[in-house]
Amino acid sequence: MTAHGIVHWTELNTHGADKAMKFYGETLGWTFDAMPMGGDAPYYLISSEGETIAGIFTLTGWKLMMVPEHWFTYFSVDDVDARVEKAKAAGGRLIREPMNIPNIGRVAIVKSASGSVSGWITPG
């Protein structure tokens, strides 16, 4: 497991995965592997020098139409459910309740008291 409190994963959330892959492939030498998710677009795993380093999530559907492209960070936590309760007690709020993602772990999306949003994950 990734140590508690450090960056576990980052992903690009974009409306233009093809453009993003072209840009990062040409400038940073990254390569991409599609991973079907059962939706409108695959999830892409990003590799650099043979190591998987990040992902690309394509923003599709009317609910995500106005969301600007951004990099999104997931922090590793020792217990998502317990840490979410601490976040709420500290003035934060949940954007997405804790949920299990098969072969990935337990994930929640948290908004801090100052307004920043991040994913918290207990890998599993």
Image: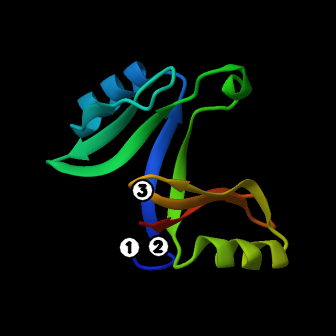
> Percent position (x, y) of residue 46?
30, 41
Q: Which residue is mark 2?
A: 6
- In the rendered image, the quadrant that contains the C terminus is bottom left
User: Left of 55 or right of it: where is 27?
Assistant: left
Tell me the SS state at disc 3: loop
> Percent position (x, y) of residue 111?
74, 59
Q: Residue at x 26, y 50 (%)?
A: 52
| Kind of residue at badge 2 | Ile
Tell me the SS state at disc 1: loop
Q: Nearer the viewer, mark 2 or mark 1?
A: 1
Q: Which residue is mark 1?
A: 2
For residue 12, above or below residue 93: above
For residue 121, above or below residue 117: below
Residue 104, numbered label: 3
CA separation in Å, label 1 and label 3? 12 Å
Q: Nearer the viewer, mark 1 or mark 3?
A: 3
Mark 1 or mark 3: name the one nearer the start of the chain. 1
Do the numbered discs 2 and 3 sit on residues whose CB atoms are within 8 Å? Answer: no
CA separation in Å, label 2 and label 1? 7 Å
- In the image, 86 versus 15, the foreground residue is 86
Q: Residue at x 25, y 28 (%)?
A: 26
Residue 79 lies in what quarter of the image? bottom right
How crowded is the residue under tag 3: few (<14 C-alpha within 10 Å), some, or many (20+)? few
Q: How is the image coloured?
A: rainbow
User: Left of 16 or right of it: where is 2?
Assistant: left
Do the numbered discs 1 and 3 sit on residues whose CB atoms are within 8 Å? Answer: no
- In the image, 5 versus 86, the foreground residue is 86
- In the rendered image, the quadrant that contains the N terminus is bottom left
Do the numbered discs 2 and 1 sit on residues whose CB atoms are within 8 Å? Answer: yes
| Kind of residue at badge 3 | Ile
| Kind of residue at badge 1 | Thr
